[in-house]
Amino acid sequence: MGAHGSSIKNLPVSKDVQAYIESGIEKDLFKNRAGSNFHEVINPASGEVMLSVPDSTETEVDRVISNARQQVDSGDWARWSPYQRQSALMRLADLIEKNADFLAELEMVNTGKLRRVARNIEVGASVEYVQYMAGWPTRIGGETLPTSIPAPEGKRWQAHTNREPIGVVGAITPWNFPFMMAIWKIIPALACGNSVVIKPSELAPLTTFKLIELIQEAGIPEGVVGLVTGGAQAGSYLTQNNGIDKLTFTGSTQTGKSIAHAAADRIIPCTLELGGKSPVLVLNDADPEAAAKTIAELVFLHSGQVCVAGTRIYVERGIYEDFADAYSAVVSGMKVGNPEEESTQIGPVQSKAQLERIENYLQESLSEGASLAAGGDPVNSAGFFVNPAVVVGSQQTSRLMREEIFGPVSALFPFDGLDEGIRLANDSDYGLAASIWSNDLSRINYLIPRLKAGTVWVNAHAILDPTMPHGGYKQSGIGREHGSTLIEHYTQLKTVCMLT
Ligand code: NAD
């Protein structure tokens, strides 16, 4: 077990962020809520309750959806040209950039994410995402169809397709990258002319509240993006409402199944971005030290609470010992602590429940005969910290190797030859992503088509870009996000056939 960090307390929060959080209690949304179920929003680094957020009632959800419907059917939004949508999205990108430090700090206090990760990866990348999506409204079109239907004398058949907005999109997001996930849901839907009703996670809703304010500041008509707050109860009011034309969900596979049922009941489309247990394959020709250093940084990004986290690390036998030594040394030296400090590498996990879950997985694995090559011990703190863990000697059939833990826990496993590596990598209910660490092109090219994963990285992991489709095989989801896939997701295809 490594000796990391110390106790973490008294996190400094800027006056602006403090005032914003306090003003949250005054939001109309939270007033007169006798009888509502409230959820505590906690700073994971200090364990302190910042505010409580109620479950929206069924009547409120209905009202928010009706407003969104009015906008997309007959409101100002329905009359906006693609150029107006493009300009508004560009204004929004500017506003996010202008507020980036504030948003990053708000995200840090609500998720425990390192300030620099919140600033550079989550908020910074979201600016580019919105800019990229702003290019789409003016590029979405249909096609002319080469029909050969016989026409009466003097007449002509003409057929073409139009792409139309789907209508009201119901979006539900998780707590790990709440700002980025809200952006990934709302922005492509708006680019295609839809309206959106979003429910962020009850654990981390703060940056979504702010995003909706910025959307209005960017000039997008009120009601086009509506907000529902709370947890499963409010989420189910949203998914079951007849006013929703499409569901888009990012979260756990378990919840994803109930979203899919709700979509099936009403025969509406749904996009599901679900859990993962992504394999990392390190081949014999890789430099064990260099690979160990980079992989460790990527596995423990946001304390391992990343859907694509490469938590199953399979290392070819020839370099297994060298890699295991180097990797365990890097992980043992990682600094756990205050997410505000530049030198911190690992912040807290999101909640006490998450911390206990991680401890349970580790205990069970140790009781089954595995051992810890690094970390795994909790940090004495009012916040939710655990030292990053390297587990060796676990069974491929163990829960630790098969279930998504969503915490700073990785497991090392040796393999012999590419076919065994493929078998182990694919031996999972999930299929979100995988990575290969090698410079041997023929071996890389043997692996790529055989890996059952929505994304395969080579000498990289967890690299995402607005142009690159993202989504999973198997129980990691249905559909893809990003790039041109927005057209499939967020428009209806209408065929027009005319005799003139
Ligand atoms: P979760 O499934 O517990 O909750 C996700 C959201 O669903 C929350 O907003 C929650 O309030 C809501 N919800 C819960 N029950 C509901 C119900 N019955 N009806 C409607 N809404 C309901 O997931 P989480 O713990 O917030 O997030 C972690 C999960 O998200 C992990 O499994 C992770 O892999 C996944 N994730 C996937 C991706 C991806 O792109 N594939 C990205 C980020 C996170």
Image: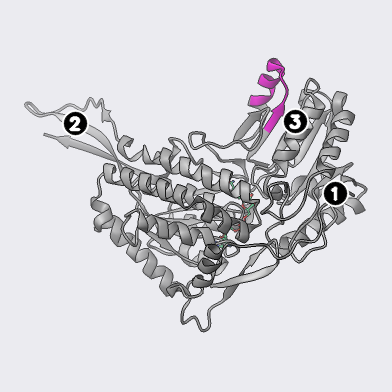
Residue 197 % position (x, y):
42, 59
Q: Is residue 445 magenta?
A: yes
Vertical relation: 330 (above or below) 365: above
Is residue 8 magenta-colored? no
State how far apart marks 1 and 2 are (Cα). Answer: 68 Å
- Foreground residue, 477 or 48? 48
Please state which amino acid type lies under the numbered disc 1.
Gly
Mark 3 or 2 closer to N-term?
A: 2
Quarter of the image for residue 279 reads top right
Q: Quadrant of residue 6?
A: bottom right
Name the residue tied to disc 1.
375
Which of the two discs, 1 and 2, labels the residue nearer the N terminus? 2
Q: Work out whether residue 373 or residue 444 is closer to the camera in this orientation and state it.
A: 373
Query: Label 2 amino acid?
Result: Gln
Q: Which color mode does the image show?
A: one colour
Q: Looking at the image, can residue 301 be seen?
A: yes
CA–CA distance between discs 3 and 1? 22 Å
In the structure shown, which secondary structural element does the residue marked by tag 2 occupy?
A: strand
Location of ligand 1 given as a quarter of the image:
bottom right
Q: Residues within 10 Å of mark 2 (few under 14, many from 20)?
A: some
The reply, left or right, for residue 84 in relation to residue 119 is: left
- The x and y percentages for residue 91 are 36, 47
The C terminus: image quadrant: top left
Nearest to N terminus: mark 3 or mark 1 = 3
Under mark 3, the amino acid is Leu
| Circle 1 crowding by C-alpha within 10 Å: few under 14, some 14–19, many from 20 | many
According to the image, label 2 marks what residue? 158
Q: Is residue 265 visible?
A: no
Residue range of the region highlighted in magenta in the rendering:
435-448
